[in-house]
Image (tube, rainbow, N blue to C red):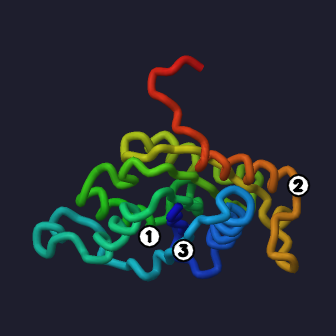
Amino acid sequence: MKLLAFAATNSRISINRTLVEYAAGRLGATVLPDAEVTLLDLNTFEMPIYSVDREAASGIPQAARDFHDAIGDADAVLVSFAEHNGSVTSAWKNLFDWMSRIDAQVWQGKPVIFLAATPGPRAGAGVLGQQAQLAPYFGADLRGVQGIGTWGEAWDAETGSLSRPEDIAALDATLSGLVAAPAQKGAAA
């Protein structure tokens, strides 16, 4: 399986970058040992702020096309959202907006897992709720959502690991959603 993983932020010291790298490692170690993981950095995909005027004048930036192609080339996607004022970062929103001009089905039907890490106790509830609600409209086969709150207590920098067993168990359960069969639309619960 080809897994695309990234933190939806342009912060180089983001706890969400740490979480997505850790989760991708756990996925390869426990759930999908043969996974081929590609980690992307949003800083590699900087581009002008989206506007219809810029699109009309210059077209869609190559960086947006490259990221869109990376999603298309993957078998599954793992993303960790930084939460800025209850929503996604401006860096991710801009990239997402440009990609939606290529194809509104940005996630291209791929199985996706949404994660978030926050310093506070809400564990990214705002951004995860918002993104989960939007996922089906943008072509995501959403297989799981997991937030990790109070990051300072949850992460052990010395071991490079989550420190609370309940967080590790919840993350592993969420990651296992990538190997589960997709939910059938209209199936009875």
The picture quadrant where one finds residue 149 is: bottom right
- Residue 9 lies left or right of residue 93; in this view the side is right
Residue 22 image position (x, y, % from top left)? 70, 69
User: What's the distance in space between the residues labelled 3 and 2, CA to CA?
Assistant: 25 Å
- Residue 53 lies left or right of residue 28; in this view the side is left
- Residue 53 lies left or right of residue 19; in this view the side is left
Secondary element at tag 2: helix
Compared with 167, 2 (above or below) is below
Mark 2 — residue?
165
- At label 1, counting other C-alpha atoms closer than 10 Å, the crowd grade (few under 14, some 14-19, many 20 or more) is some
Mark 1 — residue?
91
Mark 3 — residue?
39
Observer-nearest of 47 and 111: 111
Q: Which residue lies at the image location 50% right of the left edge and 56% below the top edge?
A: 76
Secondary element at tag 3: strand
Q: Which residue lies at the image location 47% right of the left edge and 75% below the top edge?
A: 42
Residue 109 image position (x, y, % from top left)? 39, 47
- At label 2, counting other C-alpha atoms closer than 10 Å, the crowd grade (few under 14, some 14-19, many 20 or more) is few
Q: Of the two numbered discs 3 and 2 on the same chain, state the one appearing first in sequence.
A: 3
Observer-nearest of 80 and 49: 80
Q: Of the two numbered discs 1 and 2 on the same chain, state the one appearing first in sequence.
A: 1
- Looking at the rendered structure, the kind of residue marked 1 is Ala
- At label 3, counting other C-alpha atoms closer than 10 Å, the crowd grade (few under 14, some 14-19, many 20 or more) is some
